[in-house]
Image (cartoon, grey):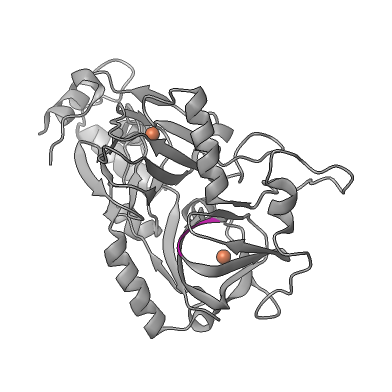
Amino acid sequence: MSSLQQQTVSRDAQLGRSRVTDNPELLAFYEDLARHGADAFWRRANAIEPWEPQSRYNPTLWKYEEMRALCLRAIDLVRPEDAGRRVVTLLNDSDAGRANTAVVGWLFSGLQAMKPGEVTPAHKHTASAHRFIMEGAGAYTVVDGHHITLGKNDYVLTPNGCWHDHGVAAEGRLSIWQDGLDIPLMNCMETNFYAVYDRPAQTPGFPSNDLPNSYGGAMQPDGVEAWTRPFSPTMVYRWEKVRDAIWSFAKASDGSPFDGHIMRYSNPQTGGWALKTMGAHMQMLKPGLHTRAHRHTGNVVYNVAQGRGYSVIGGRRFDWSEHDIFCVPAWTWHEHVNLDPGEEAFLFSFNDFPVMDAIGVRIEEPFEETGGYQVVRD
Ligand code: FE2
Ligand code: FE2
């Protein structure tokens, strides 16, 4: 038995925990309960009410070089109009990841590659989606009739219930992006609907990029119909603007000891998250920065927008470079290191924090031992 398990067993012996010792009468009682579709709560209580969150997911890293090659093979093997969406799904290295089709926690993620001229058939679902563009040129999405062009390191929303199709313009280049969805959450809550559009693609009903051009700056438009939908009207957050915002922030603040300079992709009308169920951040780690470790409820998936370094997650070291993807399961210690002595590193990430916020369980804790940094196990 590990020392952690021994600690848990001794803590479970205290008043307030289940500490019933079975005897023949109790065992007979349990059998009778089972025959009636019931069980004694005290038999299960300690397992279903752990002292602290016990993630069923493991820290996992996907190297972009390897995943990119697999995306290119998928292009040769299936057409988007047959696959629905030609996505290489990222499965967390755990039974829960494989069972729930989850990248970590209640989050889904995959890599989608499209050639110039290809279009993914228009559809909608109750799952929300967002995308982070990793490479290419000429990629676009159409969300409820709004055409949005996409460039490298842009972040774009596909809020739940919106019709969407995407593709790459004929004169563009092979494009790859990371999809993030809350499909596991929708399935857990049994709220997942899906529908296909009555034509292969939408006909845009507005000038291209009308939403980011109207709502994506420091000013908000007056004199037009008020935006009333429950998600950010900005829709796409351009890399150059995001990077400039973080550089500006870095002139004004030392940032977070746990995350460097980190900023939220926000709904400009509320200052809150851009989507209702998933949040996203961009963070900058200054050259050589080693952040202090912390842990929190909520799950996070990272995509290295720029730079090289490593993260220590649950005592394990994961080395990363541009567009590698890795995840931090709920309540797992983590810290980040920029290994470059001269260049900043930028980490894009998405999370399920809006759900944690909505139900009042966003909890965070700093690592206090060994100077605030974890001891690396392997
Ligand atoms: Fe979709
Ligand atoms: Fe964190």
**Residue sitting farthest toward the left:** 1
Q: Is residue 359 left or right of residue 163?
A: left
| Residue 168: image location, x then y, percent | 55, 74
Q: Dividing the image into 4 quarters, which one contains the C terminus? A: top left
Residue drawn at x 55%, y 56% as measured from the top left: 129
- Give the image location of residue 317, x and y in percent: 20, 42
Closest to the observer, 137 or 267: 137
Residue 356 visible, this orientation: no
Quarter of the picture holding the N terminus? top left
335 magenta-colored: no
Residue at 43% in and 58% down? 109
Measuring from the top left, give residue 217's x and y in whole percent.
68, 43
Q: Is residue 276 above or below residue 147?
A: above
- Give the main secondary structure of the magenta stretch: strand
At 65% from the left and 62% from the top, the residue drawn is 148
Which residues lie in the magenta part?
Answer: 130-135
Residue 28 is left or right of residue 38, and the answer is left
